[in-house]
Amino acid sequence: MRWSWPGFSQLPAPLLGAALGLTGLAAAWQLAMETGLGGPPDGGGGVVVDALCWLAVAVTALIWAGYGLKMLRHRVLFLADLRDAGTAPYLGTVPMTLMLLPLAAPVAGAGLPVWPAVWLAGAVLHPVVAVVMGHWLVQRMPRAVPLTPAWFVPIAGMFAAPAAGVPLGYPTLSAMLLAVGTGAWLLLLLPVARSLGRFSRQDGSSGFRPGTLPVTLVPSLFVLAAPPALVARGLLAFGVWVEMQAVLTVLACLTALAVLGYVLWRRQDIAADMRRFGFSPRWWAMSFPLAASASAAVTLHSMGRTAWTALGALAMLALASTAIAVLGVATAAWLIRPPRGRQRP
């Protein structure tokens, strides 16, 4: 077998989404263990979840180290990622991952004093990233910039702060970040909808035509499910607005399932695109929203603890786990032997 990938020093930016997705999945299963859905913590389920947590931490460190090498050794490629509206949002996953890593801490290392520092690093870095990328967007808004839901992550992803921030003892800062992130999310909703509409009618027709949305933008649609799921998790951390938590949880899960249905509807277009260009790391954009929706479903179960909520939570956990496992296998094959004739990542 011939290795043709240039190495971790040229890591594609969308793979940063893999770190966020695995971290989100580990955090979702940790929450499931706390609510009893994964069985007793000292049983087989606890061992598997702890292994998943170690995997998430290891993969995150590996990907960040690889991209750090890219920043140092291939500055031109890094700046190209930063200027590209399709890849720039993935750079904003780093502070969000930092804020969620304490939730994915393995049992053996959950009490380490490093986790508050990790969370604080993400909490301080995220507003800076939001301001920089928000300024970038304002400058380029008159042009044909594909403002996809992926931009919710770098600009509005601060709503992820309370999930780990409140248990770590930072309720005030978490509340501030939750409020700012939620406001930014609501402000971005209309521009994102308009942008998707514009890019779905490139042939000059009027009205939104979902069947003509470019395949490259399809993975980012899953990010629509992440904001309500994370806001619900934040409210759970504060223990307030239980009814709103339930509404947001249902909204997140239905959104994730609706986008999954859309992907199945566009399966022929997606298959044709993959035959032509091969697997794209941009599909990791679906990993964290599915994990966040699963976490939201577990949150809903923790409120009612009925057989139906347990079934729904386990179904969302299974869906997120299966999707991320498939993405992992596809990415490994893509890294080892990229398809010939590929023209874009």
Image (cartoon, helix red, strand yellow):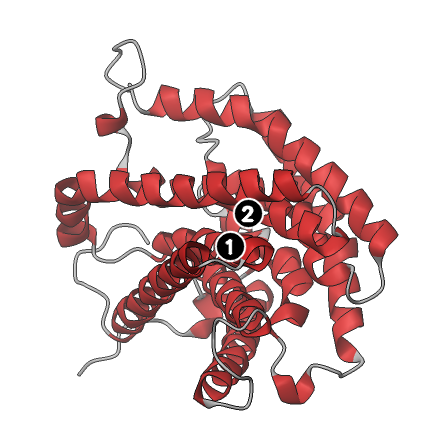
Q: Residues within 10 Å of mark 1 (few under 14, many from 20)?
A: many
Could you tell me which secondary element the residue under label 1 belongs to?
helix
Tell me the distance, in whole angstroms, between the alpha carbons under discs 1 and 2. Answer: 6 Å
Can you give x and y, in whole percent of width and height, for residue 63 in the image?
51, 71
Residue placed under numbered mark 2 in the picture: 229
Whether residue 24 is visible, yes or no, is yes
Tell me what residue is drawn at x 13 percent, y 46 percent: 272
Question: In this picture, is 342 found above or below 267?
Answer: below
Could you tell me which secondary element the residue under label 2 belongs to?
helix
Tell me the quadrant of the picture where the C terminus can be found: bottom left
Can you give x and y, in whole percent of width and height, for residue 207 in the image?
31, 12
Which residue, as the protein is rendered here, is positioned at the far top?
206
Tell me what residue is drawn at x 45 percent, y 73 percent: 8
Q: Earlier in the sequence, mark 1 or mark 2?
A: 2
Residue placed under numbered mark 1 in the picture: 292
Tell me what residue is drawn at x 55 percent, y 54 percent: 304
Amino acid on which disc 2 is placed = Ala
Whether residue 218 is visible, yes or no, is no
Tell me the quadrant of the picture where the N terminus can be found: bottom left
Tell me what residue is drawn at x 45 percent, y 35 percent: 148
The label shown at residue 225 is none
